[in-house]
Amino acid sequence: MSDQYDNIEIQEDKIPKSKSTLMQSIFNYCNVLMGVGILSLPLAFKYTGWIIGISLLFFCMGVTNYTARLIIKCLNYKEGLHTYPDIAMIAFGNLANCIILVLFTLELIAIAVSLIILIGDSLQILFPDISLISLKIIAWVILIPLGLIDLKYLSCCSLLGILTTVVLAIVVVIDGFTRDERPGSLYSPMKTELLPTDWNSLPFSFGLIIAGYAAICGYLMFGNLTKAEITQNIMSTPDHLAFLNKFIVWLVAINPFTKIGLVLNPINLYLEIQYQTSPCNLWTRLRNGCYMFTNFLSRTFVLTVVVFIAIKYPQFDRAIELIGSFLFYTIAVIFPSMFYLKLYSNNLRWWEWLVNLLIILVCTALAILGTIWAFLFY
Protein backbone atom coordinates (compact mmCIF):
# COMPACT_ATOMS: atom_id res chain seq x y z
CA MET A 1 0.00 0.00 0.00
CA SER A 2 2.87 2.34 0.80
CA ASP A 3 4.26 1.74 -2.70
CA GLN A 4 0.95 2.81 -4.16
CA TYR A 5 1.01 6.08 -2.23
CA ASP A 6 4.62 6.64 -3.27
CA ASN A 7 3.44 6.32 -6.86
CA ILE A 8 0.68 8.79 -6.14
CA GLU A 9 3.13 11.37 -4.86
CA ILE A 10 5.38 10.86 -7.88
CA GLN A 11 2.50 11.27 -10.30
CA GLU A 12 1.22 14.36 -8.50
CA ASP A 13 4.67 15.86 -8.96
CA LYS A 14 4.30 15.21 -12.69
CA ILE A 15 1.05 17.14 -12.92
CA PRO A 16 1.93 20.32 -14.86
CA LYS A 17 1.87 23.43 -12.73
CA SER A 18 1.91 26.44 -15.03
CA LYS A 19 2.25 30.02 -13.90
CA SER A 20 1.12 33.19 -15.61
CA THR A 21 3.46 36.12 -16.02
CA LEU A 22 2.61 39.47 -14.45
CA MET A 23 1.38 40.87 -17.76
CA GLN A 24 -0.76 37.79 -18.45
CA SER A 25 -2.31 38.10 -14.98
CA ILE A 26 -3.05 41.79 -15.58
CA PHE A 27 -4.80 40.98 -18.86
CA ASN A 28 -6.91 38.31 -17.15
CA TYR A 29 -7.85 40.55 -14.22
CA CYS A 30 -8.75 43.49 -16.45
CA ASN A 31 -10.87 41.30 -18.70
CA VAL A 32 -12.85 40.01 -15.72
CA LEU A 33 -13.29 43.47 -14.18
CA MET A 34 -14.48 45.06 -17.44
CA GLY A 35 -17.91 43.48 -17.15
CA VAL A 36 -20.73 43.25 -19.67
CA GLY A 37 -23.19 44.74 -17.18
CA ILE A 38 -22.65 48.13 -18.83
CA LEU A 39 -25.00 46.96 -21.59
CA SER A 40 -27.92 47.06 -19.13
CA LEU A 41 -27.05 50.38 -17.49
CA PRO A 42 -29.15 52.52 -19.87
CA LEU A 43 -32.11 50.40 -18.75
CA ALA A 44 -31.30 51.34 -15.14
CA PHE A 45 -31.51 55.04 -16.04
CA LYS A 46 -34.81 54.36 -17.78
CA TYR A 47 -36.12 52.97 -14.48
CA THR A 48 -34.68 55.71 -12.24
CA GLY A 49 -34.54 58.92 -14.23
CA TRP A 50 -31.51 61.22 -14.10
CA ILE A 51 -31.64 62.37 -10.47
CA ILE A 52 -31.98 59.01 -8.70
CA GLY A 53 -29.84 57.20 -11.29
CA ILE A 54 -26.85 59.52 -10.96
CA SER A 55 -27.26 59.62 -7.17
CA LEU A 56 -27.22 55.81 -6.99
CA LEU A 57 -24.24 55.72 -9.32
CA PHE A 58 -22.14 58.02 -7.14
CA PHE A 59 -23.31 56.25 -3.99
CA CYS A 60 -22.11 52.88 -5.36
CA MET A 61 -18.81 54.40 -6.48
CA GLY A 62 -18.19 55.99 -3.08
CA VAL A 63 -19.25 53.06 -0.92
CA THR A 64 -17.27 50.46 -2.89
CA ASN A 65 -14.18 52.67 -2.76
CA TYR A 66 -14.63 52.86 1.01
CA THR A 67 -15.23 49.12 1.53
CA ALA A 68 -12.22 48.26 -0.67
CA ARG A 69 -10.09 50.21 1.81
CA LEU A 70 -11.75 48.30 4.66
CA ILE A 71 -10.79 45.00 3.03
CA ILE A 72 -7.16 46.15 2.88
CA LYS A 73 -7.27 47.06 6.58
CA CYS A 74 -8.77 43.68 7.42
CA LEU A 75 -6.03 41.88 5.45
CA ASN A 76 -3.48 43.82 7.51
CA TYR A 77 -5.16 42.81 10.79
CA LYS A 78 -2.63 40.01 11.29
CA GLU A 79 -0.05 38.09 9.31
CA GLY A 80 -1.24 35.18 7.21
CA LEU A 81 -4.42 36.81 5.86
CA HIS A 82 -4.28 36.75 2.06
CA THR A 83 -7.82 36.27 0.75
CA TYR A 84 -11.41 37.33 1.37
CA PRO A 85 -12.33 33.94 2.94
CA ASP A 86 -9.35 34.32 5.30
CA ILE A 87 -10.92 37.52 6.64
CA ALA A 88 -14.30 35.80 7.03
CA MET A 89 -12.66 32.93 8.91
CA ILE A 90 -10.80 35.13 11.38
CA ALA A 91 -13.83 37.38 11.93
CA PHE A 92 -16.72 34.94 12.25
CA GLY A 93 -15.30 31.41 12.04
CA ASN A 94 -15.91 28.41 9.80
CA LEU A 95 -19.59 29.16 9.19
CA ALA A 96 -18.77 32.54 7.66
CA ASN A 97 -16.13 30.90 5.50
CA CYS A 98 -18.70 28.42 4.17
CA ILE A 99 -21.20 31.22 3.50
CA ILE A 100 -18.57 33.18 1.57
CA LEU A 101 -17.73 30.09 -0.48
CA VAL A 102 -21.41 29.59 -1.38
CA LEU A 103 -21.91 33.27 -2.26
CA PHE A 104 -18.78 33.40 -4.41
CA THR A 105 -19.91 30.27 -6.23
CA LEU A 106 -23.38 31.71 -6.82
CA GLU A 107 -21.89 34.96 -8.09
CA LEU A 108 -19.56 33.23 -10.53
CA ILE A 109 -22.35 31.00 -11.83
CA ALA A 110 -24.69 33.99 -12.19
CA ILE A 111 -22.04 35.94 -14.11
CA ALA A 112 -21.39 32.96 -16.39
CA VAL A 113 -25.14 32.57 -16.99
CA SER A 114 -25.42 36.25 -17.93
CA LEU A 115 -22.54 35.80 -20.40
CA ILE A 116 -24.26 32.82 -22.06
CA ILE A 117 -27.51 34.80 -22.27
CA LEU A 118 -25.63 37.69 -23.85
CA ILE A 119 -23.97 35.40 -26.40
CA GLY A 120 -27.35 33.94 -27.36
CA ASP A 121 -29.10 37.31 -27.61
CA SER A 122 -26.29 38.83 -29.68
CA LEU A 123 -26.04 35.90 -32.07
CA GLN A 124 -29.81 35.83 -32.54
CA ILE A 125 -29.68 39.46 -33.67
CA LEU A 126 -27.11 38.43 -36.27
CA PHE A 127 -28.75 35.10 -37.16
CA PRO A 128 -32.51 35.58 -36.58
CA ASP A 129 -33.43 32.35 -38.40
CA ILE A 130 -31.68 30.20 -35.78
CA SER A 131 -33.50 29.58 -32.50
CA LEU A 132 -32.13 31.06 -29.29
CA ILE A 133 -31.71 27.63 -27.68
CA SER A 134 -29.75 26.34 -30.69
CA LEU A 135 -27.41 29.32 -30.53
CA LYS A 136 -26.72 28.70 -26.84
CA ILE A 137 -25.99 25.04 -27.55
CA ILE A 138 -23.58 26.09 -30.31
CA ALA A 139 -21.90 28.42 -27.81
CA TRP A 140 -21.66 25.48 -25.37
CA VAL A 141 -19.87 23.37 -28.00
CA ILE A 142 -17.39 26.19 -28.70
CA LEU A 143 -16.77 26.88 -25.01
CA ILE A 144 -15.95 23.28 -24.03
CA PRO A 145 -12.42 23.34 -25.51
CA LEU A 146 -11.92 26.95 -24.37
CA GLY A 147 -12.61 25.83 -20.80
CA LEU A 148 -9.61 23.50 -20.92
CA ILE A 149 -7.10 26.20 -21.85
CA ASP A 150 -4.55 27.18 -19.20
CA LEU A 151 -4.84 30.64 -17.65
CA LYS A 152 -1.56 31.83 -19.13
CA TYR A 153 -2.92 31.10 -22.62
CA LEU A 154 -6.31 32.58 -21.78
CA SER A 155 -4.52 35.91 -21.36
CA CYS A 156 -4.50 36.17 -25.17
CA CYS A 157 -8.29 35.86 -25.12
CA SER A 158 -8.36 38.39 -22.28
CA LEU A 159 -6.45 40.90 -24.38
CA LEU A 160 -9.05 40.40 -27.11
CA GLY A 161 -11.81 40.90 -24.53
CA ILE A 162 -10.26 44.15 -23.29
CA LEU A 163 -9.91 45.45 -26.85
CA THR A 164 -13.51 44.55 -27.74
CA THR A 165 -14.83 46.31 -24.62
CA VAL A 166 -12.86 49.49 -25.34
CA VAL A 167 -13.73 49.48 -29.04
CA LEU A 168 -17.39 48.80 -28.18
CA ALA A 169 -17.54 51.86 -25.92
CA ILE A 170 -15.99 54.04 -28.65
CA VAL A 171 -18.10 52.68 -31.50
CA VAL A 172 -21.39 53.14 -29.60
CA VAL A 173 -20.62 56.85 -29.23
CA ILE A 174 -19.58 57.10 -32.89
CA ASP A 175 -22.87 55.46 -33.82
CA GLY A 176 -24.76 58.01 -31.73
CA PHE A 177 -22.97 61.03 -33.19
CA THR A 178 -23.34 59.89 -36.81
CA ARG A 179 -27.14 59.75 -36.58
CA ASP A 180 -29.19 62.94 -36.82
CA GLU A 181 -32.65 61.47 -36.24
CA ARG A 182 -33.99 59.89 -33.08
CA PRO A 183 -33.98 57.25 -31.72
CA GLY A 184 -30.30 56.45 -31.49
CA SER A 185 -28.87 59.95 -31.87
CA LEU A 186 -26.68 61.87 -29.43
CA TYR A 187 -27.21 65.07 -31.45
CA SER A 188 -30.97 64.80 -31.01
CA PRO A 189 -31.48 62.81 -27.79
CA MET A 190 -34.71 61.07 -26.93
CA LYS A 191 -36.98 62.43 -24.24
CA THR A 192 -35.65 61.47 -20.81
CA GLU A 193 -36.96 61.89 -17.27
CA LEU A 194 -35.51 63.50 -14.16
CA LEU A 195 -37.48 61.13 -11.93
CA PRO A 196 -38.86 57.61 -12.49
CA THR A 197 -42.02 57.38 -14.59
CA ASP A 198 -42.89 54.08 -12.90
CA TRP A 199 -41.82 53.97 -9.25
CA ASN A 200 -42.59 50.24 -9.07
CA SER A 201 -39.63 49.64 -11.41
CA LEU A 202 -37.18 51.66 -9.30
CA PRO A 203 -35.80 48.69 -7.25
CA PHE A 204 -34.71 47.02 -10.50
CA SER A 205 -32.05 49.70 -10.85
CA PHE A 206 -30.40 48.89 -7.51
CA GLY A 207 -28.58 45.97 -9.13
CA LEU A 208 -27.98 47.61 -12.50
CA ILE A 209 -26.26 50.84 -11.49
CA ILE A 210 -22.49 50.29 -11.56
CA ALA A 211 -20.90 52.54 -14.24
CA GLY A 212 -22.06 55.73 -15.89
CA TYR A 213 -20.53 56.17 -19.32
CA ALA A 214 -22.62 53.59 -21.19
CA ALA A 215 -25.68 54.37 -19.10
CA ILE A 216 -25.73 58.06 -19.97
CA CYS A 217 -25.00 57.58 -23.69
CA GLY A 218 -27.49 54.74 -24.08
CA TYR A 219 -30.25 56.56 -22.19
CA LEU A 220 -29.74 59.73 -24.24
CA MET A 221 -29.83 57.75 -27.49
CA PHE A 222 -32.99 55.73 -26.79
CA GLY A 223 -34.70 57.27 -23.74
CA ASN A 224 -37.79 55.38 -22.58
CA LEU A 225 -37.44 52.99 -25.54
CA THR A 226 -34.32 51.46 -23.95
CA LYS A 227 -34.31 47.64 -23.93
CA ALA A 228 -32.57 45.10 -21.68
CA GLU A 229 -29.40 45.28 -23.80
CA ILE A 230 -28.40 48.46 -25.61
CA THR A 231 -27.32 46.38 -28.63
CA GLN A 232 -30.96 45.39 -29.16
CA ASN A 233 -31.80 49.07 -29.57
CA ILE A 234 -28.85 49.70 -31.87
CA MET A 235 -29.85 46.88 -34.23
CA SER A 236 -33.46 48.12 -34.26
CA THR A 237 -32.27 51.03 -36.46
CA PRO A 238 -30.89 49.03 -39.42
CA ASP A 239 -31.27 51.83 -41.93
CA HIS A 240 -28.36 53.74 -40.42
CA LEU A 241 -24.77 52.50 -40.82
CA ALA A 242 -25.83 48.86 -40.82
CA PHE A 243 -22.23 47.69 -41.02
CA LEU A 244 -21.35 49.67 -37.87
CA ASN A 245 -24.35 48.27 -36.01
CA LYS A 246 -23.40 44.71 -36.94
CA PHE A 247 -19.81 45.39 -35.92
CA ILE A 248 -21.02 46.46 -32.47
CA VAL A 249 -23.11 43.32 -32.05
CA TRP A 250 -20.23 41.10 -33.17
CA LEU A 251 -18.03 42.75 -30.54
CA VAL A 252 -20.66 42.05 -27.89
CA ALA A 253 -21.02 38.44 -29.07
CA ILE A 254 -17.27 37.78 -29.05
CA ASN A 255 -16.54 39.43 -25.69
CA PRO A 256 -18.27 36.84 -23.43
CA PHE A 257 -16.31 33.99 -25.03
CA THR A 258 -13.13 35.58 -23.65
CA LYS A 259 -14.52 35.80 -20.10
CA ILE A 260 -16.34 32.55 -19.31
CA GLY A 261 -13.16 30.48 -18.91
CA LEU A 262 -11.83 33.01 -16.39
CA VAL A 263 -15.13 33.30 -14.52
CA LEU A 264 -15.59 29.54 -14.09
CA ASN A 265 -11.92 28.83 -13.37
CA PRO A 266 -12.19 29.18 -9.53
CA ILE A 267 -15.14 26.75 -9.44
CA ASN A 268 -13.34 24.29 -11.71
CA LEU A 269 -10.15 24.44 -9.65
CA TYR A 270 -12.03 23.94 -6.38
CA LEU A 271 -13.85 20.87 -7.71
CA GLU A 272 -10.64 19.43 -9.16
CA ILE A 273 -8.71 19.92 -5.92
CA GLN A 274 -11.51 18.31 -3.90
CA TYR A 275 -11.58 15.33 -6.24
CA GLN A 276 -7.81 14.94 -6.56
CA THR A 277 -7.38 14.91 -2.76
CA SER A 278 -10.28 12.56 -2.01
CA PRO A 279 -9.57 8.90 -1.05
CA CYS A 280 -12.04 7.67 -3.69
CA ASN A 281 -9.71 9.05 -6.36
CA LEU A 282 -7.01 6.43 -5.69
CA TRP A 283 -7.62 4.51 -8.91
CA THR A 284 -7.41 7.70 -10.99
CA ARG A 285 -4.16 8.80 -9.38
CA LEU A 286 -2.51 5.50 -10.21
CA ARG A 287 -3.19 5.89 -13.94
CA ASN A 288 -1.33 8.33 -16.17
CA GLY A 289 -3.55 10.96 -17.78
CA CYS A 290 -6.74 9.94 -15.95
CA TYR A 291 -6.77 13.18 -13.96
CA MET A 292 -6.98 15.11 -17.25
CA PHE A 293 -10.06 13.13 -18.29
CA THR A 294 -11.78 13.69 -14.93
CA ASN A 295 -10.98 17.40 -15.16
CA PHE A 296 -12.52 17.47 -18.64
CA LEU A 297 -15.69 15.83 -17.32
CA SER A 298 -15.83 18.20 -14.36
CA ARG A 299 -15.41 21.36 -16.44
CA THR A 300 -17.90 20.16 -19.04
CA PHE A 301 -20.43 19.44 -16.29
CA VAL A 302 -20.05 22.94 -14.79
CA LEU A 303 -20.43 24.58 -18.21
CA THR A 304 -23.46 22.41 -18.99
CA VAL A 305 -25.18 23.51 -15.78
CA VAL A 306 -24.51 27.16 -16.65
CA VAL A 307 -25.89 26.78 -20.19
CA PHE A 308 -28.96 24.92 -18.89
CA ILE A 309 -29.74 27.75 -16.47
CA ALA A 310 -29.25 30.31 -19.27
CA ILE A 311 -31.72 28.40 -21.45
CA LYS A 312 -34.22 28.05 -18.61
CA TYR A 313 -33.99 31.73 -17.54
CA PRO A 314 -33.15 33.74 -20.68
CA GLN A 315 -33.57 37.32 -19.44
CA PHE A 316 -30.24 39.15 -19.37
CA ASP A 317 -31.41 42.15 -17.34
CA ARG A 318 -32.81 39.90 -14.58
CA ALA A 319 -29.48 38.06 -14.31
CA ILE A 320 -27.60 41.35 -14.00
CA GLU A 321 -30.12 42.61 -11.42
CA LEU A 322 -29.61 39.50 -9.28
CA ILE A 323 -25.82 39.80 -9.50
CA GLY A 324 -25.91 43.49 -8.69
CA SER A 325 -28.56 43.64 -5.99
CA PHE A 326 -28.00 40.48 -3.97
CA LEU A 327 -24.41 39.40 -4.63
CA PHE A 328 -22.75 42.76 -5.28
CA TYR A 329 -24.12 44.48 -2.18
CA THR A 330 -23.52 41.43 0.01
CA ILE A 331 -19.94 40.61 -1.00
CA ALA A 332 -18.60 44.04 -1.94
CA VAL A 333 -20.29 46.23 0.67
CA ILE A 334 -22.14 44.58 3.56
CA PHE A 335 -19.64 41.87 4.54
CA PRO A 336 -16.52 44.11 4.43
CA SER A 337 -18.20 46.55 6.83
CA MET A 338 -19.22 43.70 9.13
CA PHE A 339 -15.70 42.24 9.09
CA TYR A 340 -14.20 45.63 9.89
CA LEU A 341 -16.56 46.24 12.82
CA LYS A 342 -15.83 42.78 14.21
CA LEU A 343 -12.04 42.88 13.89
CA TYR A 344 -11.46 46.49 14.98
CA SER A 345 -14.41 46.91 17.35
CA ASN A 346 -12.22 47.98 20.29
CA ASN A 347 -10.33 50.64 18.33
CA LEU A 348 -13.11 52.42 16.43
CA ARG A 349 -14.47 55.87 17.15
CA TRP A 350 -18.21 56.42 17.42
CA TRP A 351 -18.56 57.98 13.97
CA GLU A 352 -16.84 54.98 12.34
CA TRP A 353 -19.39 52.71 13.99
CA LEU A 354 -22.18 54.98 12.75
CA VAL A 355 -20.90 55.15 9.16
CA ASN A 356 -20.46 51.40 8.85
CA LEU A 357 -23.80 50.60 10.48
CA LEU A 358 -25.54 53.02 8.09
CA ILE A 359 -23.79 51.40 5.12
CA ILE A 360 -24.88 47.95 6.30
CA LEU A 361 -28.50 49.02 6.87
CA VAL A 362 -28.91 51.01 3.63
CA CYS A 363 -27.23 48.41 1.41
CA THR A 364 -29.13 45.56 3.06
CA ALA A 365 -32.38 47.37 2.25
CA LEU A 366 -31.27 47.97 -1.36
CA ALA A 367 -30.16 44.34 -1.73
CA ILE A 368 -33.45 42.97 -0.37
CA LEU A 369 -35.62 45.28 -2.49
CA GLY A 370 -33.62 44.69 -5.67
CA THR A 371 -33.64 40.91 -5.21
CA ILE A 372 -37.36 40.74 -4.41
CA TRP A 373 -38.25 42.89 -7.43
CA ALA A 374 -36.02 40.81 -9.73
CA PHE A 375 -37.96 37.66 -8.78
CA LEU A 376 -41.37 39.28 -8.24
CA PHE A 377 -41.60 40.74 -11.75
CA TYR A 378 -39.77 37.92 -13.56
Image: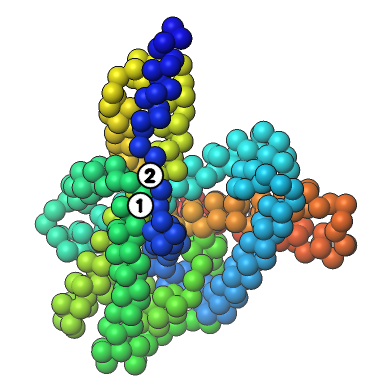
* Front-lying residue, 152 or 235: 152
Question: Relative to residue 343, is residue 155 depicted above or below?
Answer: below
Residue 280 in view in this figure: no
Under circle 2, the secondary element is loop
Left or right, 209 with respect to 336, comes to left
C-beta proximity under 8 Å, tags 1 and 2: yes
Q: Which mark is residue 107?
A: none
Under circle 1, the secondary element is helix
* Front-lying residue, 119 or 14: 14
Q: How far apart in space, not on screen, are marks 1 and 2 (Cα)? A: 8 Å
Q: Position of residue 83 (x, y in %)?
A: 60, 47
Q: How is the image coloured?
A: rainbow
Residue 159 in view in this figure: yes
| Label 1 or label 2, whichever comes before in sequence order | 2
Q: Quadrant of residue 167?
A: bottom left
Residue depicted at 71% across the width and 54% down the height: 76
Question: Relative to residue 316, is residue 182 depicted above or below?
Answer: below
Q: Quadrant of residue 1?
A: top left
Identify the amino acid type marked 1. Lys
- Give the residue number, with chain letter if any, for mark 2: 18
Question: Relative to residue 115, is residue 218 depicted above or below?
Answer: below
Q: Nearer the viewer, mark 1 or mark 2?
A: 2
* Front-lying residue, 331 or 135: 331
- Residue found at the very far left of the displayed protein: 129
Bin the neighbour count of mark 2 within 10 Å (Cα to Cα): few under 14, some 14-19, many 20 and up. Answer: few
- Give the residue number, with chain letter if any, for mark 1: 152
